[in-house]
Amino acid sequence: MNESKKRLIARYAVDRGEDFELITRFDDGTIRERVSKEDPRAASIMPRYPAAIWFERKIRDDFGIRFEGAFDQRPLLHHERWPRDLHPMRRDFDVHTVLELSDYRPYRYEAIGGDGVFEVAVGPIHAGIIEPGHFQFSQAGEDMLHQEVRHFYKYRGIEKMLEGKTLAEAAPVVARISGNESVAAQIALARIAEAAAGEEAETGIAARRALLLESERLAHHWTDLGFIPNDAGFAAALAYASARAEEVRRWMAELTGHRFAFDAIASKPRPWNPDQILRRIAGMREAIDWFENWIVGIPSLWDRMDTTGILPRSDALRYGCVGVVARASGVALDVRASEALYTHNGFAIQSEESGDVAARFKVRIAELRHSLELMERFVPLCSEAPFVFTEKGEGAFESFVESSLGELYLAVEMEEGRIRRFFFRDPSFVNWQALHRMMPGNIIADFPLINKSCDLSYAGNDL
Amino acid sequence: MLTYWQKRFRTGVLTERPEFDERMKVLRKRLKKGIAKHFAGSLAIRMVDSGSCNACEAECNALSNPYYDLERLGIRFVASPRHADVMLLSGVLTFNMLPHVLDAWEQIPEPKWCITLGDCPVMEAPFTRTFAIEAPAAEHLPITHHIPGCPPSPDRIIEGLLEFLEKLDTVKS
C-alpha cells in the first residue's frame, strides 16, 4: 500500500455551454479537464481511487459523460423507473420538468455466486425509524461474503434546485440538506459567502459558530453512544444516552430558538446566559465520565464490539475515508486541526488504531469529552455580532467543515451574485463506499451494529 | 451494571419542567382514552421517510427517550406495514421513493390512515419543487391528518397524534 498517494476529495462536472469541465479535487490540488459535448468521454480513475466509483457514476447520470476504463457503468441516481437518457445537471434541462415513470429496467446487484451462496435484500424501507436505502448481502449461512450499498432513494435534486439562487436564498435549503449536520452545512455556506466577499469571520462570530458545531457533535455522539450498544442488545445505554442527547437538543433550542439550530448561523444571535451554558457543560462532563466508567464494565457488550467490522487503515486511506470512520482506523484526519480557533484552544485529534466497532465507539466518547473542553474555552470568546450574506461574488469558492459525520466539502461557483454550480460532498458519500470492506468475516446480525458505529447520512449523501 | 442501579436509586424520579409535565399529563390521559376508543388500546405506526433531512426521524426517535417515553401511552412504531394502523409519512416524496411508499401503503391492512409529518410532504419546507420531487403527498395518497413543523418537536408530535385521534371521532377511514 502506497501511503503517499493523494486523497480523492471530490470529482464532479460543470456544464460550460460549449463543453463540460470535469473537476477533480485531491487533497493537494485540483485538476480540470475539458470534455467535449459531441462525444462526452473521459478517462476513469476508478481503478486507482475506489471512491471515484460513485463520483463517476453520478457524473454519468447527471451529465451523460461516459468513463473509459470504468469497471462499474451502472446508473447511480437513476433508478429502475427513470426516463432514459435524461441528464438533469445539463444547463438545458429545466429543473421543473415533470418526469414520467418509464419502463422497469432491473438493477444488477453485485453478487457472489457459488454453491449454497444466497442473497439477502434489505430496504429501501427499513424496520425502524431510519432513512431509506438498500443493502444487498451475499451470504454463506450467517457469514457475510459481500454487501452492496445502493442509495439515492432520497435524491431531491438539490444541486439543481439551488442554481440561480443567491446565497441568502439558498441558506434555508442548505440548512436542511441533512438534519444530522445542519450546523456544519450552514457554516460551510457562510464561509463560501465570506470567501466571495474576500472577508474572514471575526473571532467572536467564529467562536459562536464553533460552539454550535460542537453542540451538534454532542447531540450526535450521544445518540450513537446509545444506539450502538442498543444494536448489540444493551438497551440501558440507549435510555441513558438518548436522555443526554435530548438535553443537548434543548440547549440548542435555548441558544438558537431551534432544536437542530436550523437557520441559526445566518440569523441574529439570541441573548444567552454564558454562565448557564458553562454549568450545563460541566454537568455533561460528569455525565460522560459516569457513562464511560459504567459502559467499560459491561463485558458482554465489548464482546460484541471488539474485532467486529474492522476497517483496516490501508482501506481507510485507499477509499479516502473521513471523520470518526477514518480516525478509528488510525488516520489522523480532522478539518479542525487546520483551524486557528481550534488549535489555539488546545484541539487534539482523537484516534484509535484497531478500526473496529469498539474503536469507533471509543473515538466518539473521547471526542464528546474533548468537545466539551473546547466549548468551555469558546464560551467567553463568543460575540453577538450578526452575520449577513453579501450579494457580492464572482468566481469559484470552496470550504471544508468537520461535521459530526466527518469532513464536509462544499464548492460553489458564483456568477453575478448568484449560484451557477452548487456541489456538496457529504462526508458519508466516501464513507458509504468503504462500508462493504468491514463486512467479510462478520455475521449478518452484526451488520446493524457495524452500520450504526459509522453513523452515515442518507439525506446528505443522496442530496 | 451495579453502578447503573446505584445511580438509578440515588437519582429517583425527576421532574424538570413542571408546566411541561402538567401539559403532558393532560395530553397523555386524553391520548390513552382516544387510543382505547379507536384502536383497542394500542396504536401501531409505520413511519416512512420519503425524502426527509432526517430531523423528523430524529424527533420521532426522541419520542422513545426517557423524557417522553411514548410507548407507555400505547403507541408503538412497528417494523412491518402489515402490523400498522397508521402510516406516518415524512419527507418530500422523491421520484425514487414514490413506488416504494405506495407499496408500503398497500401493505397496510384496512382500516388505515396516513398522517403527514413535518413541512416537507406538504411542500411548505424551503425546498422548491424539482424534477426529483413528487410532493405534495396528497396528490398520491389519501391524507387524514397533518402535523406541521420543521421538524415538529416531540411534544408537538404527541399533540398532533392527539388531534388525529380527535378527528377520528368525526371522520372514518
Image (cartoon, coloured by chain):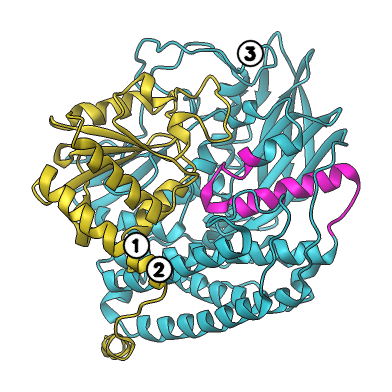
Q: Is residue B145 above or below residue A145?
A: above
Residue count near mark 1 (Cα–Cα under 10 Å), binned few <14, some 14–19, many ≥20 = few
Amino acid residing under circle 1 = Arg
Q: Which residue is mark 1?
A: B23
Q: Quadrant of residue A81?
A: top left
- Whether residue A451 is visible, yes or no, is no
Bounds of the magenta span?
A172-201
Q: Is residue A173 one of those drawn in magenta?
A: yes
Helix, strand, or loop for circle 1?
helix
Image location of residue B5, percent across then percent down: 26, 87
Circles 3 and 2: CB atoms closer than 8 Å = no
Q: Quadrant of the C terminus of chain B?
A: top left
Q: Which chain is yellow?
A: B
Quadrant of residue A295 within the rendered picture:
bottom left
Q: Is residue A448 left or right of residue B92?
A: left
Q: Nearer the viewer, mark 1 or mark 3?
A: 1
Discs 3/2, front: 2
Please name the residue that numbered disc 2 is placed on: B19
The chain that appears cyan in the image is A
Q: Is residue A418 left or right of residue A242?
A: right
**Residue type (three-letter) at the residue carrying disc 2:** Glu
Residue shown at 32% from the left, 88% from the top:
B7
Are discs 2 and 1 both within one chain? Answer: yes
CA neighbours of label 2 inside 10 A, class few (<14), some (14 to 19), many (20+): few
How many numbered dots are placed on residues in this image? Answer: 3
B27 or A327: which is nearer to us?
Answer: B27
